[in-house]
Amino acid sequence: MSAFALSVILVSPKTPGNIGSAARAMKNMGANDLRIVAPRCNVLDSEAIAFSVHAEELVRQAPIFATLEEATADLDFLMGTTARQRDDLPEPIFPSEVKPMLAAFQKVGVVFGREESGLTTDELARCQSVLRIPTSDYASLNLAQAVLLCCYELLQAERSSGAVPVPVTEATDLAPREQMERFYEQLQDFILKVNYTDQPRLKHKMRQMRKVFDQARMTEDQIRMLRGLWAQALWAAKSKKFIIED
Amino acid sequence: MSAFALSVILVSPKTPGNIGSAARAMKNMGANDLRIVAPRCNVLDSEAIAFSVHAEELVRQAPIFATLEEATADLDFLMGTTARQRDDLPEPIFPSEVKPMLAAFQKVGVVFGREESGLTTDELARCQSVLRIPTSDYASLNLAQAVLLCCYELLQAERSSGAVPVPVTEATDLAPREQMERFYEQLQDFILKVNYTDQPRLKHKMRQMRKVFDQARMTEDQIRMLRGLWAQALWAAKSKKFIIED
């Protein structure tokens, strides 16, 4: 997926649960190297293990360092994270913007600061890029959420599912879902009354119908047109005694 | 930022804390319409309020519906979420892949299922797109993390910070950080000894130096070359008595 290996460095985390949650987030996104600098709690606390869920080995194997310098000595590109602009430092960029630079490196690290105060300006100055996560005006991400979003953006965001997305067509006055549901109710009724399918196969058939008509992205006029067609077809069938019940 | 409004619909959530955390995640990412279908807990439980942090009003204002159909009647594009492929349904695509389609809509909803079992196949069949979040082989996201990543990708991921990222140059054998730090130590020593700056201004000056040389992305040979230059300059200065101390 990625040419580089991503290490996550937590500087002086305070709450064991945050360490565990960060490890869980990392593992979900495919980052497997957790390093901890000067923790302010017991990293192997039962809460850390519980919150890590199946990423327990990331927490248990995490090396502990006294300083950020020691923790990052072997890395060749370092990104610091911050929630705000700092004096003397370059303006923070978004994780998606640093991504193109990472292809040139093998060992990349992303550093997260203290729960209350983040990284110091000195710590950020050791990093070659300063990252900020894009948010709305309201920004209050916890440590594990920040780790999750960074690892997602750096390791997963550009992946392709391999599935073919439904093609897009422009439309201005699409019918609301409520009308589509009324449309499907009438279609289902129609299908049963004309004996197109039977009750056991009905659900499966309706799913196939939904694929067709959801993809069609109809306007209210188009829905009205088709509902009119079915009502008419039903009347015609009925008048010729094609109806089993009713 | 986005032309469409994004609603988040939680189907039968069980744990109040998850509702609160989901609301907090939404607000961070700029989604402000939370809707809840047939909750299995008290939505206004103190835990829900506590976990929402500053997104309390999203929880307090969230309308409660009996069915998914009622909850989504006014929306014009609906996305369901799943962690796995389901029979009878299209292969799930990633949130980044559905994003280009959303420009054509005004009111878009993303639906999240029960903590233990997700959405039913019937519920997913009501959605025009089925989404899966890209993860590593290990996938164990909780409800609020899934909400966070979907809202991030649909509302924030394509934003630009406006900052100019450091330009990228290709390099194969970049010096590890440890050598860069030794380099900066020697540079700092050099700067002080030649009286280039004084102790109060040193930190600021070193940050400016770091911007230059980090951006230069040097190899070990290049570092060696510059360290040699400074050692030589210091020797020359010393022999001419330019040194204050040492």
Image (cartoon, coloured by chain):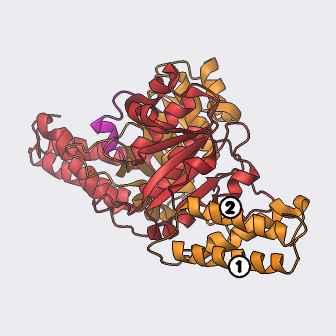
Chain colours: A orange, B red
Image quarter (top left, top right, bottom left or bottom right) of the C terminus of chain A = bottom right
Give residue B217's quadrant in the image.
Answer: bottom left
Which mark is on residue B49?
none
User: For the residue carrying disc 1, how many other residues have a C-alpha within 10 Å: few (<14), some (14-19), or many (20+)?
Assistant: few
The percent position of residue B70, horizontal first and vertical second, equals 58, 48
Q: Looking at the image, how many numbered discs can be counted on the residues?
A: 2
Instruction: Report the side of B85 relative to A202 (left or right).
Output: left
Amino acid at dot 1 = Gln
Residue drawn at x 36%, y 52% as measured from the top left: A129
Q: Nearer the viewer, residue A74 or B89?
A: B89
| Residue A61 appears in the rendering | yes
Labels 1 and 2 share a subunit: no
Which is the main secondary structure of the residues drawn in magenta? loop
Q: Residue furthest front?
A: A239
Q: Are marks 1 and 2 in contact (CB under 8 Å)?
A: no
Subunit bearing disc 1:
A
Q: Looking at the picture, how far across and down is residue B136, in whole percent?
A: 67, 51
From the viewer's perspective, is residue B217 above or below residue B50?
below
State the extent of the magenta-drawn residues as a range.
A113-128
Q: Amino acid at mark 2?
A: Pro
Which quarter of the image is occupied by the N terminus of chain A?
Answer: bottom right
Residue B74: percent from left, percent from top: 50, 55
Q: Which residue is mark 1?
A: A232
Residue B174 forms part of the magenta stretch: no
In the image: residue A158, left or right of residue B233: right
- Taking the spot 9% from the left edge, 37% from the top edge, the residue there is B244
Q: Is residue A113 visible?
A: no
The secondary element bearing badge 2 is classed as loop
Q: Residue at x 72, y 36 (%)?
A: B116
B56 is higher (above) or lower (below) than B31: above
Residue at the disc numbered 2: B92
Q: Does the magenta portion include A126?
A: yes
